[in-house]
Image (spheres, rainbow, N blue to C red):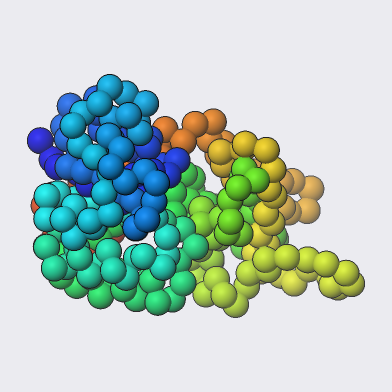
Amino acid sequence: MTRIGILGCGGRMGRLLLQTLAFHRQAILAGGVTAPGCALIGKDLGTLAGCDPIGLSASDDSDGLFALSDVVIDFTTAAALARHAALAVKHRRALVVGTTGLDAAAMTSLDQAAEQVPVLRSANMSLGVTLLAALVRQVADRLGPDEFDIEITEMHHRHKTDAPSGTALALAQAAAAGRAVPLEKVWRKSRDGQIGPRPAGEIGLSSLRGGDVVGDHQVIFAGLGERLELGHKASSRQIYADGAVRAALWLVGQKPGLYGMNDVLGL
């Protein structure tokens, strides 16, 4: 049985992961950590998951969690990522990162950790979204920028703090890779006022926020006289928890390196 630790066990995704591991046949819960000073410290992890008590309590001891785990899943914040990456290296543990909104410093910390331990990062752990990104790259490769414009829209619940979503950015990156161009040179994250005609090759991203939407993403290839739309709608966050646990099980035993969900699915 693979021992999986959860960083951010008190959040929405953290509690789903606790719940998922409570009934898993290939993995067991090694422990759960929340932020220092959090009111959930000392609470039984089974209770946090909405299940029966299991005799393990939430703590703020990240170092101890890495020591007890074979692999750790991180759904916390970009600010905490550098420390968690360093702990993964210290204890020689695999690390799965689902945190979004990462800045350059956080990405650098993952790159450095991946030189010594296996690290998997994905903005979206859904198997369906992983396949969607692969399709987007193929379509972008075949439908050129002079004939087809690319627009990406995403909608999430009102509490989401970053925009565009990490998944939308990943889809944009897939589209740019399909056209062999750097995303930063062709993306357009917002439009307002007199912006002029749309440049050929531009990849547009639009964000919507409201209600309790789990996650909707759509990639539109708009040509003259036709339009191709590829999309994914999540109705439950459970898909992200299932994907994260699958990624964690796959990552244990891999060589040091930076991996993604494509590697898990063999794409």
| Towards the viewer: 42 or 153 | 42
Question: In the figure, 56 relative to 69: above or below?
Answer: above
What residue appears at the point 34 percent right and 58 percent down from the top-left corner?
36
| Towards the viewer: 187 or 220 | 187
Question: In the figure, 50 relative to 148: above or below?
Answer: above
Looking at the picture, how far across and down is residue 126, in whole percent? 42, 41
The answer, for residue 216, to whether it is visible in the render is: no
What residue appears at the point 11 percent right and 63 percent down from the top-left corner?
91
Residue 99 is left or right of residue 199, and the answer is: left
Looking at the picture, how far across and down is residue 267, in whole percent? 33, 49
Counting every numbered tag in the picture gives 0
Looking at the picture, how far across and down is residue 220, in whole percent? 66, 50
Residue 113 is left or right of residue 79, and the answer is: left
Looking at the picture, how far across and down is residue 22, in whole percent? 25, 28
Q: Residue furthest top?
A: 52
Quarter where residue 32 is shown: top left
| Towards the viewer: 200 or 132 | 132
Question: In the figure, 208 relative to 93: above or below?
Answer: above
What residue appears at the point 58 percent right and 56 percent down from the top-left corner?
161
Residue 181 is left or right of residue 36, and the answer is: right
Quarter where residue 196 is shown: bottom right
Q: Residue furthest right?
A: 194
| Towards the viewer: 43 or 174 | 43
The answer, for residue 176, to whether it is visible in the render is: yes
